[in-house]
Image (cartoon, rainbow, N blue to C red):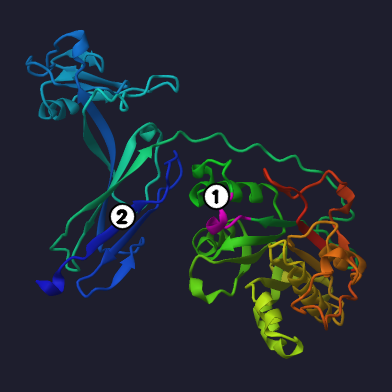
Amino acid sequence: MLADSPPVVVRAELLNSVPIEGVEIEPYVLIQFPNGQSRQVNDDDDSVLFKWLRCEYTASSDTQDGPKTCIMTGKAATMQCLLPDVTFEINGVTYTHEQAYFASVDEFAKAWQFHERHHRDADAPKPRRQDPSRDFVNVWQEIGQSRVYVPQKQDVGRILKLECTPISQSGLYTGKAVSAESGEVMAAPRLPPVRTMIEVPPTGPNSFTPGGKATFKVMSYNCLADIYATPQVYPYTPSWALAWNYRKRNLLREILSYKPDVLALQEVQCDHYKEFLEPEFRAAGYEGVYKQKTRESMGQDGKMDGCAILYRKSRFVLVEKHALEFNHVAMSRAKQFKSDKALQCLLKDNVALVLVLEMAQGGQGVGMSARVCVATTHIYQNQGFPNVKIWQVMTLVRELEKFTVPRQLPLVLTGDFNSQHDSAVYEFLQRNGVNMNHSELQDDSAGILDSAELRHGLSLRDSYMMLGKDFCSNYTSAFVGVLDYIWHTAER
């Protein structure tokens, strides 16, 4: 018996603070086995039986209007149905919720098999669940048996409950069920407004032509990793709008609407890429490569974010892929720094991803002359460390220079550089170097830049220059400006 004992549900929690019509509710369920081992339950786990229920609630009758009688037995009523979209057909007579009184919960349960639910207008009154003068008794209707549930239209305005019942390996024994309740399900919000795009005249044909030039569409997007989308950082945003399960479909819909040929993403959480973005983009005709940040404490498949580059399979084939870990570079150059403080400052876990793509026809590459190098990165964000930012960008650009120039590869460099137009980073990229008298480089007490060569031989052009001063890539309550860029080599 002990060998086949069911596990114990240690914790069951609904991660969506406000359930939304059409948005998956994904629970967090932790179980512990008799041997003391614990694990989180996933879709492939058969150690827990799931049951989703929707609340159909009642309340004690309002005695202010005088005594009421039960529509089932004629006895004195103690309960009233408060669902405004429900009627009961009892012995050929139809009762609205205003007339639906019952002598007991048992009588209500008997009558429930004869109920009908009607469409409720958005402006119709909600059940009086918050009336403090009424004692409520909840009646639940089963609506699903999967781990994840997607609220439907009929769930709007209702409370949902998930019951988790642990089951033994043989399936013969069950343990104590643990449940978690949601708030009232919210109707699906309207779709976000479509962004106003600035059209740039094309400079050539929209497909590869031997002997000519090729054009393709590049998009760069910071996805805002779920671990950073907190109410503390975004207090002006409703918590339900910050939840990944709500945002992910909006992100996917917007990105695919622009039909990019090459897509560079930053702040992509590892599990979100594997479980959602990669399969969704593959279904849309893309292949991609992902590089997670280097913070091992989060676990290889943990919640750490990273960068990804995806490309349309009908336009490109992958030739090479490389990753640059700034931590690794800093540690390999530790002897060049005068103090340990410099190395400590540089260990920030940021990474860069580099692909060599070749334009394709019929799924096959068309030759080395049709290759392009695409890179993306997410530079350290803390504004108090401009020396770290310029060191990371310098390191990346110097490596890209050594990689692309001898092979005459065109370069597209994208990313969230966390740097504005007046920054040392921007000057370095645009002018092939930065003046050491730049205001951001005056405080380098750690000696990070003591032996740095702050120049490069790439001729990079800012793709956004033609858009003018009113253009911005970031718009929040605290900041409006440009931090993200798409650079490309001007001569290739």
Q: Where on the picture, by quarter, is residue 286? A: bottom right
Query: Could you say where residue 435 lies in the image, as x and y percent from the top left?
Result: 92, 70
Asked if residue 307 is among those painted magenta in the image, a careful observer would answer no
Query: Could you say where residue 427 lies in the image, as x and y percent from the top left?
Result: 88, 64
Asked if residue 230 is among those painted magenta in the image, a careful observer would answer yes
Residue picked out by circle 2: 12
**What's the magenta region?**
223-233
Does 458 appear above or below 47? below
Give the farthest residue toward the bottom.
335
Q: Which residue is drawn at 64% across and 66% down?
A: 307
Query: Could you say where residue 98 lies in the image, as x and y percent from the top left?
Result: 25, 14
Q: How crowded is mark 1: few (under 14 residues within 10 Å), some or many (20 or more)?
A: few
Q: Where on the picture, by quarter, is residue 462? A: bottom right
Q: Which residue is drawn at 55% across and 48% down?
A: 247
Of circles 1 and 2, which is in front? 1
Question: In the picture provided, is 323 more to the left or to the right than 67?
Answer: right
Q: Where on the picture, by quarter, is residue 277? A: bottom right
Mark 1 or mark 2, earlier in chain:
2
Does 256 appear above or below 58? below
Secondary structure mainly formed by the magenta segment: loop
Amino acid residing under circle 1: Gln
260 vs 421, nearest the viewer:
421
The C terminus, quarter of image: bottom right
The numbered mark at residue 232 is: 1
